[in-house]
Amino acid sequence: MNILVLNSGSSSIKYKLIDMRDERLLAEGLVERIGEATGTITHRRYGRAGAPEKIRRDAAIDDHTTGMEMAVALLTAEDTGVVATQADIAAIGHRVVHGGELFHASTRIDERVMANIEACIPLAPLHNPGGLAGIRTAIKLFPQTAQVAVFDTAYHQSIPPHAYQYALPYALYEALGIRRYGFHGTSHRYVAGEAARLLDKPLAQTNLISLHLGNGASITAIANGRSVDTSMGMTPLAGVIMGTRSGDIDPAIVEYIAVQQGMPLSDVMRLLTKESGLKGICGRNDLRDIHQDAAAGDDRARLALEMLIYRYKHYVGAYLAVLGEVDAIIFTAGIGENDPVVRHGVCQGLDKLGIVIDPRRNTDWQGRAAAISVPESPIKVLVIPTNEELEIARQTAAVIGS
Ligand code: ADP
């Protein structure tokens, strides 16, 4: 059974076609700059062995429909394709960023589901419209195929009220839905499942702290396989320091900047989202550059690195207390998978709390899910490559199978 996974943005569509018999990636691609004078589609076809064949086309891509038609043509053509006809695609799984409180699980898409995704647009004005455009287009092009929505927020719907409520007038929660929702749920759920497998323990009996550390980053406390708290909030601006996002700050700073700098609120929000985080501290948002600068003696780069590690560690400590008992902490995503310095920094000094990293395993880690703690460490430290598309495909298969 082949499942097509779609991640549609306002001007892009990412796709992956996965054969669920062995969870093998058959083809993937990216349609970019939809609606601009020239767009691009990059398509990769994977064989059983060797490097994938790569095809790139430049053309005006007026809208999502045109973009998706081009992708479908590449997936089904003799010279570039991996399936003979559209009918060889059993179902389509769509990534949707925000499901608010309306979606606790992945769900088969119908008119009511689409209306509810639309109702969540005020909570994610930059993300949900793209997702919805992708869904509408896919239904148009694949009217006979099952379509499933998989939400970034759904995994966190198990967080209890004392952890998701903000201490604001309760009426604001009731009227506007102001609360913690959390994001990266698909990734946290995926690595939690892989961790349970690695620990050889049922997920429903496993407590984890999952660190999804990419350009955007969030840390989640997982009790018995379910999310019970997460660092992001109503929006992805909250929590740890990120590439260009501030993470948690004193909310009074917003007014102070606006008044002192004579800045409109929208500019302050832009500053917190695009000009802060690592970039705000040292001018760079990619950790690879920051390591280089720090090694060359740049004090701000060093400070940014220390701040980043400190804030990650802060959440690990908080969630150790929230969970009481933890089987493993998981590092994943761009930074989590690739940066041994950060992993070491986060774990350093936590021996007495049960986290004992093995420095050699940490630096030798090579791309496959594995422990980097010493064998006798009471809490295991795992590095697990995330795979959000595979998780979306698994969820889609589960929904259509049920
Ligand atoms: P996102 O999906 O949020 O855009 P990723 O999970 O792809 O982000 O992570 C991207 C980030 O990962 C980069 O900004 C960079 O800071 C970090 N990163 C990627 N490769 C490395 C590496 N080899 N060493 C350190 N950091 C890395």
Image: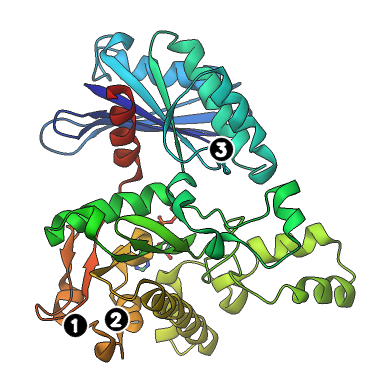
| Residue position marked by numbered label 1 in the rendering | 359
Which mark is drawn over residue 344? 2
Q: Earlier in the sequence, mark 1 or mark 3?
A: 3
Residues at discs 2 and 1 in contact (Cβ within 8 Å): yes
Query: Which amino acid type is shown beneath numbered disc 1?
Result: Pro
Where's residue 359, x and y in %?
Answer: 19, 82
Apparent side of residue 359 relative to residue 30 in the rendered image (left or right): left
Q: Nearer the viewer, residue 272 or 181?
A: 181
Residue at screen point 30% across, 13% down: 77
Apparent side of residue 376 relative to residue 63 in the rendered image (left or right): left
Is residue 314 depicted above or below 57 in this figure? below
Check the picture and name the quadrant holding the N terminus. top left
Quadrant of ligand 1: it is: bottom left
Q: How many marks?
A: 3
Is residue 83 depicted above or below 187 in this figure? above
Is residue 178 depicted above or below 248 in this figure? above
Quarter of the image where one finds residue 332: bottom left
Where's residue 70, x and y in %?
Answer: 44, 18
Q: Nearer the viewer, residue 392 or 57?
A: 392
Q: Nearer the viewer, residue 185 or 367?
A: 185
| Residue position marked by numbered label 3 in the rendering | 102
Mark-to-mark CA distance, 2 and 3: 39 Å
Q: Earlier in the sequence, mark 2 or mark 1?
A: 2
Quarter of the image where one finds residue 375: bottom left
Where's residue 229, x and y in %?
Answer: 46, 63
Mark-to-mark CA distance, 1 and 3: 44 Å
**Which SS class for mark 2?**
helix
Query: Which amino acid type is shown beneath numbered disc 2?
Result: His
